[in-house]
Amino acid sequence: MKLKKGDTVLVIAGKDKGKEGEIIRALPRENKVVVSGVNIAKKHQKQTKQTMQGGIIDRDMPVHASNVMLVHKGKPTRVGYKIQEDGTKVRIAKSTGEVIS
């Protein structure tokens, strides 16, 4: 998977198309990511402890990685890999060829 936790992504397909958010969690085995503010579902949660709040809560659900695109310098771009001279593998933006930190 070419996306990591902390990346800013743009949703390119689905009910939340056009929304932008940060990846909270990456699920590489399922090829899914959890993006803040995207694909929100209501969950009925029972109170388990005195400090925990019960009731209906909003929860961010996973989105397939193919439905999001990395945003680099304000523009969505595809991600590729490049091996540098010192042998390290880095992610690059396909549109500009720049290294993504």
Image (cartoon, helix red, strand yellow):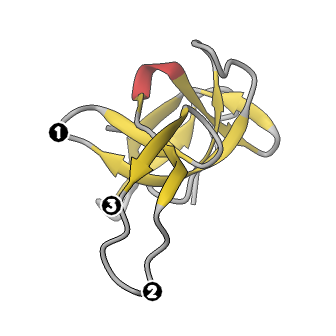
| Identity of the residue drawn at 67% across and 26% down | 95
Q: Secondary structure at mark 3?
A: loop
Residue 70 percent coordinates (x, y): 60, 36
Figure quadrant of residue 29: top left
Please indicate, yes or no, whether residue 3 appears anywhere in the rendered image: no
Tell me how far mark 3 sits from mark 2, CA to CA.
47 Å
Q: Residue furthest bottom?
A: 50
For marks 3 and 2, the one nearer the N-term is 2
Amino acid type at circle 3 is Thr
Q: Residue at label 3? A: 88
Q: Residue at label 2? A: 51
Q: Secondary structure at mark 2?
A: loop
Amino acid type at circle 1 is Arg
Q: Nearer the viewer, mark 2 or mark 1?
A: 2
Mark identifier at residue 6: none
Residue 41 percent coordinates (x, y): 51, 35
| Identity of the residue drawn at 43% across and 78% down | 52
Could you say which is closer to the camera, residue 7 or residue 16?
16
Residue 5 percent coordinates (x, y): 46, 57
Q: Residue at label 1? A: 29
Could you say which is closer to the camera, residue 71 or residue 93?
71
Q: Are marks 3 and 2 in contact (CB under 8 Å)?
A: no
Figure quadrant of residue 51: bottom left
| Identity of the residue drawn at 36% across and 49% down | 26
- Graded by Cα atoms within 10 Å as few (under 14), some (14 to 19) or many (20 or more), the crowding at tag 1 reads few
Q: Is residue 95 above or below residue 93?
A: above
Residue 90 percent coordinates (x, y): 42, 52
Q: Nearer the viewer, mark 1 or mark 3?
A: 1
For marks 2 and 1, the one nearer the N-term is 1
- Quadrant where the C terminus lies? bottom right
Amino acid type at circle 2 is Thr
